[in-house]
Image (cartoon, coloured by chain):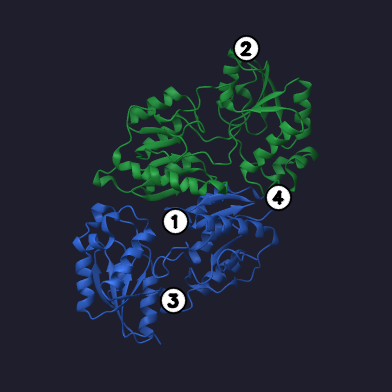
Chain colours: A green, B blue
Amino acid sequence: MVPFEKLGIVAGRGDLPLKVAQRASSMGVGVTVLILKDQADPTLYQDQYACHIIRMGAAQASIDLVRSLGIRDLVFVGAVNRPSLFELRPDKKALTIVGSSLMKLGDDGLLRSVISYLEEKEGLIVHPIHTILDDIMPETGQLGALAVPSEVQADIDKGCAVLNAMAGLDIGQAVVVQNGVILGVEAAEGTDSLIERCGHLKRAGREGGPGPVLVKLSKRQQTERADLPTIGPNTISAAARAGFSGVVIQAGRSLLVSKAETIAAADAAGLFLLAVTDGNDTQ
Amino acid sequence: MVPFEKLGIVAGRGDLPLKVAQRASSMGVGVTVLILKDQADPTLYQDQYACHIIRMGAAQASIDLVRSLGIRDLVFVGAVNRPSLFELRPDKKALTIVGSSLMKLGDDGLLRSVISYLEEKEGLIVHPIHTILDDIMPETGQLGALAVPSEVQADIDKGCAVLNAMAGLDIGQAVVVQNGVILGVEAAEGTDSLIERCGHLKRAGREGGPGPVLVKLSKRQQTERADLPTIGPNTISAAARAGFSGVVIQAGRSLLVSKAETIAAADAAGLFLLAVTDGNDTQ
């Protein structure tokens, strides 16, 4: 049982916030969805849950709202497109929280600033998503029916090594590797776009060798309370379309949405799906 | 005057090998173009220069050919698409040169292996391209009419810092930065493709702020005798189309083809063009 009666779900894009709302509700927790304006789709929530639309730049109004609702416990769920300063229109409180570094911090730095502020100065508690969705983080090991083909192991090792070397840089944490060559590195474009372009760059299959591998790990400094790397059925279908051989994620530091469906999709497409602990244990 | 009478130009893609052939000819050097099969376009050279088509995997035949022509001095010019093992069909000599690591080495490692072998075991000399095209390497400083806008300086610093941190990884050495955010990292897709996708990811211009910056530096371990980062008029027009504010390259470690034309294109499009020494001197 979760140790709170009320939960505020700060909802970004996608349907993951809805899954959190459904699970929390089913556990008897009173759910309020704080719909991030221009990010979450209000129609997903409005008929079923108490909802309020909040604007990212309106920090004072949002904090006042959370207080007036008697909410102490929050989760941040769903992707957020980084707004322009024009769209953000930060209020005085928002500027206080992130300071003059507003547009200079990477996404991680920004999120960490916001969460630290809410916890240290406002007495709120920001929980990681797996407090609610306790089956969303994969455990270490082979997840689907297919084992990692031995000739792909070196590519997995290389992908993990490159990501670990890049981990302090606050850029994307996914790479695509084939035959020892890094075909693509993710930054702001998103994993699906990375997969698609690497499908066009991959070595022709005339040799019958294995296709590329997607390796997606958590950044070292990434807060587990927001924005962990996420894969789901769409990732698998994109990888299958692009002729990949498999997908590697991180156990305990990434989100596997619709786990059963994702694994079934990998099995059906003949892709392996592996969860490594920290990228230094890829065997 | 160059210190040799005969030059073998190992020609990859694009028209840069032709420029080298023209310049060397104009200096009185006897030019033989060694056209890499499936990479260089033979029709560019066949009417004007002594030409032989060589296959990348046929190392013994290529070395024998170079010897029989009395050539000691070589340049490697032009991009090369990494072939599949099927396409490469390496002969015994090629396998000796790169060893069992053939498909595991990154592009840099492969090129360094080949060049070391030719110099140390075969007594050939591989010259950097600027031995011939002595105006192709930019000097440090502002190259076009436009100075770097002060609000872009932090993005240039960040791009250089990220590239320097990635320099040991043998992946691409170009990034796109805007407002402190790394929009894209180049791997195998090429700079034009990087520019195009970052054009779609850039922050909307409603604030009147500056567009993204392309920063393209040489990898630390990259041999200057092949495959230095290259920009030219096409890079500028791609960056202009995508709404970029400017382009940063590396003095003495990158190739600026068609220099006058490239600078004129940047000036016409309102882009700055800056050459930094090593990415630690970005002011």
**In this figure, which residue is indicated by the disc labeled 4?**
B207
Q: Are marks 3 and 2 on the same chain?
A: no
At numbered mark 3, what does the secondary structure look like: helix, strand or loop? helix
Q: What is the three-letter code of the residue carrying label 3?
A: His
Label 2 marks a residue whose chain is A
Q: Earlier in the sequence, mark 1 or mark 4?
A: 1
Q: Dot 3, crowdedness within 10 Å: few (<14), some or many (≥20)?
A: some
Does the residue at mark 3 contact the one at mark 1 (Cβ under 8 Å)?
Answer: no
Indicate left or right for B22 with B240 as reference: left
Label 3 marks a residue whose chain is B
Q: Position of residue B198 (x, y in %)?
A: 54, 50
> Where's the C terminus of chain A, which quadrant?
top left
Which of the labelled discs sits on residue B130, or is there none?
A: 3
Nearest to viewer (mark 3 / mark 4):
3
Which of the labelled discs sits on residue B190, or is there none?
A: 1
- Give the distance between the C-alpha atoms of the residues marked 3 and 2, in whole angstroms: 72 Å
